[in-house]
């Protein structure tokens, strides 16, 4: 495959184009909506990936072209996510790129002979080695309509695509966007999985109920997700077999835990165990009558007092 015989020198093709076109192109390059959409994929300047390499190879087959690329365009550079048939650095300055012009196109660009097109004839890749002649590029367009990159083909002699080849290149561009979406979903899933593993590790350290964010809040596992409950809202806890009901803010949360493990997570001065099955917030105790106490709250509750807990309870209360 032909390679440059001397370093390609950078020039500014903007100088050769009408001022109105240049201004429009610069606006498209720096469009914040487009750049935000691009950055949301977190893919700039990342390592090669097989899925995109395969698309570049398929583009070479579809277009019968020796060089194909999958690229991404930010406001300053064109990044090469995949290259086929030609050695390129990881990125090029925007002023040296062909695909910047794709930002003003509504569809595929095809140039049979770049030396006859004002947009490309002064580009150093055309005017110098390797003397690119043919260029075709399909935009990578997000679901929101932002062009964030391209899948493109080059040849060193004039070339023309058939309509079937054009449709094939468009289909590959669509596939590239789908791969970006899948890649983003995978990265997000891996991040969420890592967070979940950290949560589960903390749970395994202290029981299955949840994790403590200090003694002022609990994260309770409910239906596969974690719910934050402020301990200031907890009125009482009730053990039921291997589970505990936590009553807070007129809500009942059920967790797999023991009263002992939960008592260790609650502010020691605010909660007291009054029965082998009950822990109550001390400030919610309204009356004590015989073997029961009443808790003030949205719905008054009667809780039994265990014989082995009575003395400890009364010693904590300011009884007269």
Image (spheres, rainbow, N blue to C red):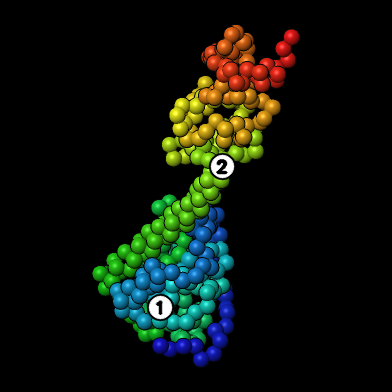
Residue 74's label in the rendered image is: none
Residue at 43% x, 51% y is 144
Residue 279: horizontal and vertical position, in percent?
Answer: 58, 24
Side of 49 where 318 appears, left or right: right
Element under disc 1: strand
Residue at 70% x, 18% y is 315
Residue situated in front as seen by the camera: 306 or 245: 306
Side of 95 where 224 appears, left or right: left
Q: Which residue is disc 2 drawn over? A: 206
Residue at 70% x, 20% y is 316
Q: Residues within 10 Å of mark 1 (few under 14, many from 20)?
A: many
Looking at the rendered structure, the number of numbered marks drawn on it comes to 2
Q: Residues within 10 Å of mark 2 (few under 14, many from 20)?
A: some
Question: In the rendered image, which quarter contains the N terminus?
Answer: bottom left
Mark 1 or mark 2: whose residue is earlier in sequence? 1
Q: Is residue 281 visible?
A: no
Residue 232: horizontal and vertical position, in percent?
Answer: 63, 27
Residue situated in front as seen by the camera: 112 or 276: 276
Question: In the rendered image, which quarter contains the C terminus?
Answer: top right
Side of 291 where 175 appears, left or right: left
Element under disc 2: helix
Tag nearer the camera, 1 or 2: 2
Residue 84's label in the rendered image is: 1
Residue 290: horizontal and vertical position, in percent?
Answer: 59, 8
Residue 218: horizontal and vertical position, in percent?
Answer: 58, 35
Q: Is residue 231 visible?
A: yes
Vertical order, 318 against 192 (above or below): above
Residue situated in front as seen by the camera: 122 or 217: 217
What's the distance in space between the residues labelled 1 and 2, CA to CA? Answer: 53 Å
Side of 88 where 265 appears, left or right: right
Residue at 52% x, 81% y is 124
Location of residue 230 by image quarter: top right
């Amino acid at each position: 495959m032909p390679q440059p015989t001397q370093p390609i020198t950078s020039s500014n093709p903007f100088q050769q184009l009408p001022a109105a076109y240049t201004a429009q192109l610069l606006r498209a390059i720096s469009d914040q909506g487009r750049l935000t959409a691009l950055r949301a994929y977190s893919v700039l300047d990342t390592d090669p990936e097989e899925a995109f390499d395969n698309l570049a190879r398929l583009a070479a087959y579809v277009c019968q072209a020796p060089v194909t690329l999958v690229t991404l365009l930010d406001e300053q550079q064109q990044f090469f996510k995949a290259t086929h048939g030609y050695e390129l650095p990881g990125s090029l300055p925007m002023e040296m790129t062909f695909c910047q012009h794709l930002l003003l196109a509504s569809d595929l660009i095809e140039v049979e002979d770049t030396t006859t097109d004002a947009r490309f004839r002064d580009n150093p890749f055309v005017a110098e080695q390797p003397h690119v002649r043919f260029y075709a590029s399909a935009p990578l367009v997000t679901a929101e309509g932002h062009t964030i990159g391209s899948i493109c083909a080059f040849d060193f002699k004039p070339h023309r695509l058939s309509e079937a080849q054009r449709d094939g290149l468009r289909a590959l561009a669509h596939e590239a966007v789908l791969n970006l979406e899948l890649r983003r979903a995978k990265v997000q899933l891996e991040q969420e999985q890592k967070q979940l593993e950290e949560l589960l590790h903390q749970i395994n350290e202290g029981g299955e109920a949840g994790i403590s964010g200090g003694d002022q809040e609990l994260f309770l596992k409910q239906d596969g997700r974690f719910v934050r409950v402020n301990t200031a809202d907890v009125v009482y806890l009730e053990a039921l077999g291997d589970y505990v009901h936590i009553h807070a803010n007129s809500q009942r949360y059920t967790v797999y835990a023991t009263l002992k493990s939960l008592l260790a997570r609650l502010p020691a001065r605010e909660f007291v165990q009054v029965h082998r099955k009950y822990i109550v917030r001390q400030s919610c105790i309204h009356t004590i009558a015989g073997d029961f106490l009443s808790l003030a709250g949205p719905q008054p509750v009667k809780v039994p007092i265990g014989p082995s807990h009575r003395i400890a309870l009364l010693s904590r209360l300011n009884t007269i």
